[in-house]
Image (cartoon, helix red, strand yellow):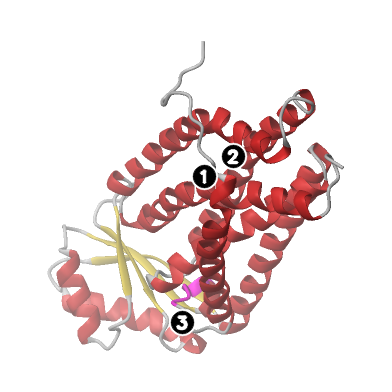
């Protein structure tokens, strides 16, 4: 017995495509602009991509993160980011700075000295100093872009084989829309572009594909079994309406899971989980209002199934 969150619907999703195409185009342009800015190094790049130093250590007794931030700022590291680690060793912190990445070793040592001097009665124990130079950061940027490109090509090939080439192209374009939307969020909210954020974007792409496969599978089946009973556009609309309840339930349950991480997952995972939470809504939107209308437009201009 299937669970239905909403009753039977008859919404003309395809009829809204002119408006949604405009909205999606604006989102895509914003995402492309964000990608250009990130590639040019004009975004808040994490030390993995921009170079810098990460110092990790712990204190004997609890330290207020505000007092720790004040001490680091007074020492000249105003743009340093500080995160408290709540697992394993108590009173542990990670301090990241992008100042003078060419001298990462000396900066890490200087930060260690600052912490020891600022809290003389609370011993600071250094766990590690992680250094990333500019050349390494540029290499990681290239690898991240290559990973994203390979993922998109793989998705195109999979959907093209699983369904047909037109479905594959429509799914890939819609997924690019989702990726651009995620990049726009990261850039315009000035979030740090880190390996964790890139992982969230690729995870979002995978989730987006799953949702589109569900919609496309129903469209394909309906067009095959009801070809003589329903016209093309009404058939696509019917298919989307039939899976709408399932899509909403799947998205809602995943949304609640990622929202729980946003609320209780801590500072380290907050941006990662927030991006996934917003991305779930974007991926669901693009399945209905981007991927399916693209397929319809292509079929209308160059009929293949309904000649």
Residue 273 position, x and y percent, is 41, 50
Q: Is residue 45 magenta?
A: yes
Q: Closer to the N terminus: mark 2 or mark 3?
A: 3
Is residue 154 positioned above or below 130 on the image?
Answer: above
Majority SS type along the magenta span: loop
Image quadrant assignment for residue 29: bottom right
Residue at (24, 86) in percent of width and height = 75
Upstream in sequence: badge 3 or badge 1? 3
How many residues crowd around disc 1 within 10 Å: few (fewer than 14), some, or many (20 or more)?
Answer: many
- Looking at the rendered image, the disc whose residue lies closer to the viewer, 3 or 1, is 1
Q: Residue at x 67, y 30 (%)?
A: 218
Residue 87 % position (x, y): 32, 47
Q: Is the residue marked by circle 3 packed among few (<14), some (14-19), or many (20+) residues within 10 Å?
A: some
Spatial separation of the CA atoms under disc 2 and disc 3: 46 Å
Q: Nearer the viewer, residue 171 or 84?
A: 171
Front: mark 2 or 3: 2
Residue at 48 percent across and 88 percent down: it is 103
Compared across the picture, whether 151 is left or right of 114 comes to right
Q: State the residue position of label 1.
A: 284
The residue lying at 48 percent from left, 24 percent from top is: 8
Q: Is residue 234 above or below residue 226?
A: below
- CA distance separating discs 3 and 1: 46 Å
In magenta, the rendered stretch is 44-48
Q: Which mark is residue 211?
A: 2
Q: Are marks 1 and 2 in contact (CB under 8 Å)?
A: yes
Q: Position of residue 46 (x, y in %)?
A: 47, 72
Alpha carbon distance from label 1 to label 2: 7 Å
Question: Pointer 3: what residue?
Answer: 105
């Amino acid at each position: 017995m299937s669970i239905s969150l909403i009753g039977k619907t008859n919404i003309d999703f395809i009829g809204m495509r002119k408006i949604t195409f405009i909205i999606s185009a604006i989102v895509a342009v914003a995402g492309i602009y964000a990608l250009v800015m990130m590639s040019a190094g004009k975004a808040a790049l994490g030390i993995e991509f921009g170079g810098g130093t990460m110092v990790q250590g712990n204190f004997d007794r609890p330290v207020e993160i505000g007092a720790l931030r004040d001490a680091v700022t007074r020492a000249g590291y105003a743009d340093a980011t500080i995160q408290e680690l709540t697992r394993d060793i108590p009173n542990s912190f990670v301090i990241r700075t992008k100042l003078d990445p060419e001298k990462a070793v000396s900066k890490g040592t200087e930060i260690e000295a600052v912490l020891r001097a600022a809290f003389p009665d609370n011993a600071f124990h250094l766990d590690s100093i992680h250094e990333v130079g500019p050349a390494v950061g540029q290499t990681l940027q290239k690898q991240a872009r290559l990973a994203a490109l390979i993922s998109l090509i793989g998705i195109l090939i999979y959907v093209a084989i699983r369904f047909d080439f037109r479905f594959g192209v429509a799914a890939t374009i819609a997924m690019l829309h989702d990726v651009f939307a995620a990049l726009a969020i990261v850039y315009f909210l000035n979030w740090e572009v880190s390996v964790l954020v890139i992982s969230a974007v690729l995870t979002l792409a995978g989730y987006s594909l799953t949702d589109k496969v569900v919609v496309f599978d129903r469209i394909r089946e309906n067009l095959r079994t009801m070809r003589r009973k329903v016209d093309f556009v009404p058939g696509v609309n019917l298919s989307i309406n039939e899976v709408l309840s399932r899509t909403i339930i799947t998205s809602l349950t995943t949304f609640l899971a990622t929202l729980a991480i946003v609320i209780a997952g801590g500072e380290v995972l907050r941006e990662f989980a927030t991006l996934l939470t917003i991305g779930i809504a974007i991926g669901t939107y693009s399945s209905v209002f981007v991927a399916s209308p693209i397929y319809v437009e292509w079929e209308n201009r160059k009929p293949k199934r309904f000649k």
